[in-house]
Amino acid sequence: MCQVGEDYGDPAPEGPPPLRPGRELKCVKCTEGLPVVVIRAGDAFCRDCFRAFYIHKFRAVLGKNRLIFPGEKVLLAWSGGPSSSSMVWQVLEGLSRDSAKRLRFVPGVVYVDEGAACGQSREDRAKTLSDVKLILQTLGFPWHVVTLEEVFALPPSVLRCPAQKPVGTVGTYKVAVDSFLQQQHTLGAEGVGGSPSSAQGEAQPSQPCTQDHRDLAGPPLAAQTEALSRLFDSVKTLTAKEELLQTLRTHLILHVARTHGYSKVMTGDSCTRLAIKLMTSLALGRGAFLAWDTGFSDERHGDVVVVRPMREHTLKEVAFYNRLFAVPSVFTPAIDTKAPEKASIHRLMEGFLLRLQAQFPSTVSTVYRTSEKLVKAPRDGCAAGPRCLLCMCSLDVDTADSATAFGAQTQDFSQRQPSTPLAGAPTVPCRAAEVGRALNCCQGTRPCRREDSRAHVIEQLCYGCRVNMKDVVSRSHSWVVTGEAHPPGLGATRPLVHGHPLLQPSLDPLPPYILAEARLRSQRPSPEIQEYLLENSDDEAHTSGSGAWGPPEQEGKDGQTACNCINKNIFN
């Protein structure tokens, strides 16, 4: 029997037990070198074997999918973090002459400065940009540095999906590779030396100088910075802020890719990050779009395809590789830096999965392998239907006549009417006259139609984006008064009691290109109505375009006019 206070010997030693003589741990790959990295239990690699294992993962993902053709321009989305820095480093090594199997595409790098959304000062942002430029100048790739404030100057066309080029088959890919190799052999025989990709890679160090000065013409305007800060201050929850930041960042990167002729965009999403994103998307009501949000390729944007070549690497592997081989990176505080675990769904899901991973090492891989089995198959009739205004996925939602709860929510938005003012209360326009006409908000002395315009925007969002947009509020111009409502400064027949500005849901802080595109979409007839519209004659089609609606160029001009009108009110 055990006795209280009985001594059972010396306490257990701390740390792992010493290895027996003659049984030192060896690398599982070469069985000769001393291991420096233990990825999983029993998987110990030496330095050279771990490097070969890491590079093979990256090359295998690209080779298995065969989406990037030789000579194609690919934009690398670099945030300065570990995963994206490792991705850029893999591309840099894959394009070197010492590489066994060289990469054949033409890369470029884009960096988005998000300091204004994260609350950084101008001095901190300037220091971060100087560190970013030092790293980018050593790569030898064309690079573009943009600020998040530039979303207030984007055109509405960034939210449209141009016709996607047909995806090449395996035979087409082999023909493209053979043609590329034949061209390389011909150039080598002529004495030019090097492949077209290498020639472009060697000639590109002189290009960043011109592109840098064009993209970094100067610091963002103070009005744009203030508008961006006001936008994120109007969002109530950290979850909605993170989703909004990701959406705006994606729109800005797409605009840079289309402007400079890139057909592919590479992101540094790792296996661990994608597993967290899958669980977070489920909690946010984006289960219908998991295959696009976590798959290797994302074709929702049409002419620009987003690929994720780092999806086979865990964060642990990325950290070890960057440490062993001195991969440079830049630390920038994110919008959720120093936030508690329960501050957002993203943080809560991240802590949940990482704690499970510490106790059960196969947690992340199990969740990740589940995402690989998801198929991109939307509902019948939704593939070519309307798309979400923000995430640009197919609007796979229930209609207003559905018996589900979401159908009732859709019906509520579609039938909402603008509120009428109280009798005797003066009418005050909620926006400037120009913006009111652009957003169809106020018309003379008629009641304000801000709620009606907000309903038009909400109707064009998927379920997950609708939930996030509910957390966007702004100060209303109306005041709460005991017994009577009146605007401030106009006087009242009764004394003001408990008067304060209201915080009401409003989408006014959103960038102008989103509001302008929502206005254009709300004015377009539905597909059912378009079937009954008469087409113009040949003479009329020559002047105004075919069909009842004008050509896309005219819609683009209308959208740009609306954006300019909204910008005039915001920044003046």
Image: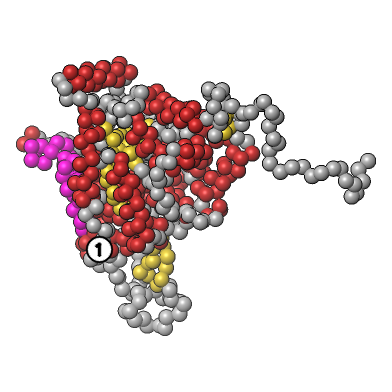
Q: Is residue 323 visible?
A: yes
Label 1 amino acid?
Phe
Q: Position of residue 437 (x, y in %)?
A: 22, 59
Colour mapping: secondary structure
- The residue beneath circle 1 is 571
Residue 426 location (% of width, % of height): 31, 73
Most prominent secondary structure in the magenta stretch? helix
The extreme front residue here reads 21
Quadrant the N terminus occupies: top right
The reply to whether the magenta stretch includes residue 371 is: no
For the residue carrying disc 1, how many other residues have a C-alpha within 10 Å: few (<14), some (14-19), or many (20+)?
A: few
Of residue 93 and residue 73, the one placed in the foreground of this image is 93
Q: In the image shown, does 209 or 26 lie closer to the viewer?
A: 26
Q: Position of residue 50 (x, y in %)?
A: 49, 30
Q: Determine if residue 282 is in view.
A: no
Point 55% across, 48% down: residue: 348
Image position of 322 (left or right of 305): right
Does residue 153 appear to the left or right of 54 in the view shown?
left
Chain part drawn in magenta: 540-566
Residue shown at the point (15%, 20%) measured from the top left: 190
Residue 533, image x and y in percent? 20, 37
Identify the residue shown where x is 32% and y is 54%. Answer: 130
Picture layout, residue 96 above or below residue 5? above
Residue 563 on the magenta span: yes
- 295 or 542: nearer the viewer: 295
Residue 160: image quadrant is: top left
Secondary structure found at label 1: helix
